Image (cartoon, coloured by chain):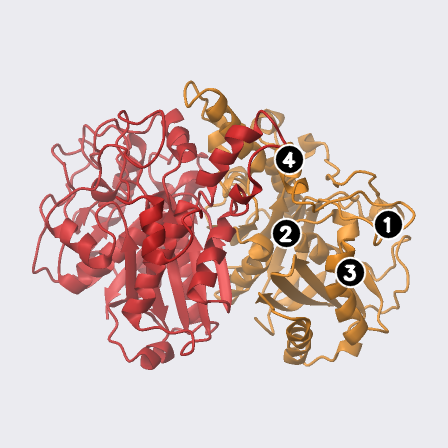
Amino acid sequence: MVNMNCYIRATGNISPQHSLDPVTFSQTRVHTTQDYFKVIEPDYDGFVDSKLIRRMSRIVKMGVASAITCLRQAGTENPGALVTATAYGCLEDTSSFLRRMIEFEEKMLSPTAFIQSTHNTVGAQIALLIKCHQYNNTIVHRAFSFENALTESTLLLGEGMGPVLVGAIDEITKDSHTLLSRFGLYKPTDREDPHFSGNIAGEGAAFFLLDKDPDHHPLAWIQGIKTLYHPGNDETLRLFFLDFLNSQGFQPDQVDLVLSSHTGNKERDTIDQYLLDSLFSKKPFFPFKTLCGDYPTASGFALWLATQLLAEQKQPAWMKDLTFPLNHILIHHRSTNLHHSLYLVSRC
Amino acid sequence: MSASSWIAGLGIISAIGQDVQKNLASLTAEKTGIGEMTWLRSDHQGELPVGEVKSSNTELAANSGLSKKLPRTALLSSVAAREALVDAGWQVKLAPRTGFISANTVGGMDKTEHFFEKFISNPAAGKLAEVVYHECGAITELVADYLGIRHFVSTVSTACSSSANAIFTGARMIRSGLLDFALVGGADALTRFTLNGFNTLMILDKEPCRPFDENRRGLNLGEAAAYLLLASEKGLEQLKKKPYARISGYANANDAFHQTASSPQGTGSLLAMKGALEFAGLSPNQIDYINLHGTGTTNNDIAEGTAIRILFDPAYPKMSSTKAYTGHTLGASGAVEAVYSVLSIQQGLIFPNLRWETPMKELPFQPVTTCLTNQRVQHVLSNSFGFGGNCSSLIFSAA
């Protein structure tokens, strides 16, 4: 997917950082000593009727509040389409129903957890809350969930169905963290070297309102996205970067900042380091997962961060090496070495 | 931009047959696939009838060549997806710009259920190999790797409308020029998780289901996988194949009424059907057959029926729900019914709504009850409605 007419009009982001409050976000960086990074949850009463909140699971609350923040920022209540991306879906309710089904030997079960366990629950609850009868879809494809949702969104924009509300959302639960930890994925971050020493699990809900035209004072322009499944070797990957930039009429030295996928796992991070060294050796980079943790839809957080930096044109207190004006940010999102995606996001 | 999506290949595995020809034979012979639970291991065995694919995982694995240890959804998916590609004469070398867009709702839940039996009493117990393919997307990737498709791979999950959404996602990508071929559809195996989930909602019929009947008591769950190979104009030339039909319209709308129930007036269903007709540039009287979502629940059938009354009254097309044959196959149902819709056009058949006896008192129409042959079928409307208010309608038209 190249040369897209896709402008970000507004954002909403609930993450482990102070992302609902841009001023605090730029001044204070949140660290964790755990091997997971949970979101800072807002007071949901400010978003949804408290009677409704009590019935919502955590991932639904996060998703709904993030989507509402985005719509409020845009000053609209009626997106033309809603596309939700989640790799894992509603894990808390899935675990809960599964546990009870086994413990009670398939008898005397309550439907609540099952009802909220389907992958489209977040998208459905947003539609229900804002009474949105428009197009509504949910993409659930691992570390391409958000990328494929964005590709779909740009096609919808092209068909005149905008503005499109698109969001990336995944949660950490006790069971999912226990399970994923058993694969040896995580270790706590060392405060002394917060960039590279640990790999932490993450979660978040990032929503964006997208327009086809730059008519509504956009915050940033998504110039292009491209995904690569099963790259094979490092050289294929290097060419993937070059081809993508070429397709945008870009050379690596025109990129002002790379948001990289370093996770802290030294063995796996050799790919990221190789790419930076061979293509962007003189360019500043920032490993975005050190802010939001590692999860398949973390690219939602990365896109929010890029949007924030391009719109504000100001270096957060805890970042360094940025030069201004900041015009073009390249996001590289990967999960293991199976899924790679690139975003070119530019200043409007 | 207005290029059509041509349907060049079909593949299906369901309770009424393990390929297209066997499904067609069962449909015309009015032979249901719903019966006593045999392969799924559940406490509800003997109590709840289901539409099972009549093969063990070992047999399915032998058919596809994949490992029998993989989730059943992946095994079902691989069999039907391969049939669609072979049917079309598609080859990796021939068609690099191919996408695989598959829907499912359960992912590797059958294996996760087994894992959790040990895991809930000891967090260090259970074989990790059983949860590796838990995610819906992991199922799609297993099959994409099996087929050799890498260019674009995606998974849709919107409950019971999942594969209808996967189908038009592929059609949209072909229309916009992003793909030459799109293998689209979905798969879902029966699992205890979904069986018990639907059972808690008290919408499962303890007898074989009777969609659109006044005395309907609920749905039967089923399992299946079904795929269509869509081709652009250029793709079709490459295949040198006469297409079966084309996708002429689609629309997706949300009921925005309740997480699991449909609005009584069928708002979402009406919007989806209307939207698909508008997209196709057709008027309601041009539809020859409606393949109903028709689950057999009190709520779905009255909502869908009401929306049809509003849109079509007084001239109703022929219609039927084929879920009385297959059961409700959830994430696969839109694709299963898409294959049946294409067969309807291609063979000039209208499939019956099995076991139907009594008209619904609220509705002025009734479904077809015997298999009608030698019909002129130009345009078929296929409905898929799901939890979360997700409503999608597809229109298939003669090539």
Q: Position of residue A157 (x, y in %)?
A: 53, 63
Q: Amino acid at mark 1?
A: Pro
Mark 3 to mark 4 CA distance (whole Å): 33 Å
Mark 2 — residue?
Answer: A297
Mark 2 or 4 closer to N-term? Answer: 4
Q: Residues within 10 Å of mark 2 (few under 14, many from 20)?
A: many
Q: Nearer the viewer, mark 2 or mark 3?
A: 2
Vertical relation: A79 (above or below) B241: above
Left or right for A288, reference B329:
right
Q: Amino acid at mark 2?
A: Thr
**Residue located 62% across and 30% down the image:** B123
Mark 3 or 1 closer to N-term? Answer: 1
Mark 4 — residue?
Answer: A173
Nearer to me, B221 or A135: B221
Colour in which the image shows chain A:
orange
Mark 4 or 1 closer to N-term? Answer: 4
Q: Secondary structure at mark 3?
A: helix
Task: Kindly tell me whether residue B226 is visible in this rendering.
Answer: no
Mark 1 — residue?
Answer: A194
Q: Are marks 1 and 2 on the same chain?
A: yes
Q: Are marks 4 and 1 on the same chain?
A: yes
